[in-house]
Amino acid sequence: MSDAALLAVVIAAAGGLFAGRAWTASRRRGERLGFRSSPHYTEGLHCLATGQLEAAIRELEKVLRDHPDAIEVQQVQSHLYREVGKVERAIEIHRRLLSRRDLSRAERAHALANLGTDYRRAGFLDRAANAYADAMKVDPRNLHALAGQQKLFEEQRQWREAYEAQAQLMRLRKSDDGLVLGFLQAELGQEALRAARREAAEKAFRTAVSLDRRVFPAHLALAGLWAGEDPRRAATILEDAIAAVPERAYLAFAPLQQAYAAAGEPSRFVTLCEHIVSEDPRDWRARLALARHLRAEGQATEALGLLLRALDANPHVLLLHLEAWRTLRELRPPGPEEQRYVATVEQSALYVDPHICTACRYRADDMLWRCPHCHEWNTFVEERVGPGAGRV
Ligand SMILES: [Zn+2]
């Protein structure tokens, strides 16, 4: 489902929610659903469903001209303004709504929570925190306000508060948020590590892994804690991490290679890579790691053979081309023009190792645990372009 379609469904659901509440309220306060008979309302919904947000805004404006008291339409309209980047208009609508005396408790809490999100989007973090807190005072179980507070804590890197808010959300929603809680514990571990509190850090990383084994950075950090004094133990932790999340294995390659070498067993890295290659004929990360290992050991011809096989199935992977050039350079020193050409290509490559957020399509040249755009956890995957495209 595209972002716009998803948004339309969410907004339509929000509209339905308010319409439902308004229906109950309308018996008390007279007719508040008259707007539904407006042709502009129908047209506005159609625009929403087809992702034409600006057109939907125009249609709903027309509805509001005839039905200025339609709370539901104002709520949907403010969502739309926020989504198209006109946050100041959304703030204006919510403030106007909040000045009304005929709002139910739920409507007031929801408007306050939305105002908090408007402020958060506009970068007024203190005002956002206050609006969310006010919403919680009106309705302590308002999920929107609690989720907004949680995101605000995350954005301000207040990991303890973010963890507690997430735990409360999980209780209220009766959902399983172990993965997010695990990532927040991993952040708490990193914080303890920076403050040189090793024991607290280790405890947080262990909690993270016990909450959800897929919290890969917690495995990496735990292995890092043991790398110096007990490389065998570090290697075991990393092997467990790969077993838990095979698709992230490549993130453990470098520390694992070091741990095996420190333990005096460098050949185990070769065995591991060969095993991964035999399991997945399309894999290129293990082939690349193995090729680098072989080149470092002076076996450039074997390394090149591996790279060429990896390129057969993954001709779009720039990292493989870069490594192939480096290996070729060792086998046959190139002339000055060839060197200049390769240097130009290396410098002009923008996305050497492209990753993409599966939630919002944000692109990055690295693996990120939390998306800087939509703020979701663990949503990044390797972006496949070229022949393997469409597998994201
Ligand atoms: Zn994202």
Image: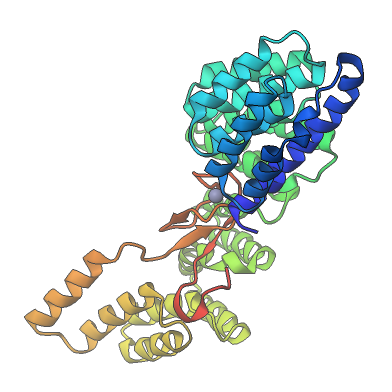
Residue drawn at the location 65% of the way across and 59% of the way down: 1
Q: In the depicted view, which residue is nearer to us: 114 or 4?
A: 4
Quadrant placement of the C terminus: bottom right
- Decide: is 322 above or below 213: below
- Decide: is 175 above or below 140: below
- Left or right: residue 359 versus residue 255 is right
Residue drawn at the location 59% of the way across and 87% of the way down: 278
Q: Give percent across and percent down for residue 76.
A: 66, 33
- Left or right: residue 352 versus residue 57 is left
Q: Give percent across and percent down for residue 162.
A: 64, 31
Residue drawn at the location 92% of the way across and 20% of the way down: 27
Q: How many marks?
A: 0
**Figure coloring:** rainbow
Q: Give percent across and percent down for residue 270.
A: 50, 80
- Decide: is 152 above or below 283: above
- Decide: is 161 above or below 28: below
Q: In the depicted view, which residue is nearer to us: 273 or 84?
A: 84
Quarter assignment of residue 104:
top right
- Return the residue found at the far left: 336
Q: Give percent across and percent down for residue 250.
A: 52, 67
Q: Is residue 156 visible?
A: no
Q: Is residue 314 visible?
A: yes
Residue drawn at the location 65% of the way across and 26% of the way down: 64
Quarter assignment of residue 21:
top right
Q: In the depicted view, which residue is nearer to us: 80 or 148?
A: 80
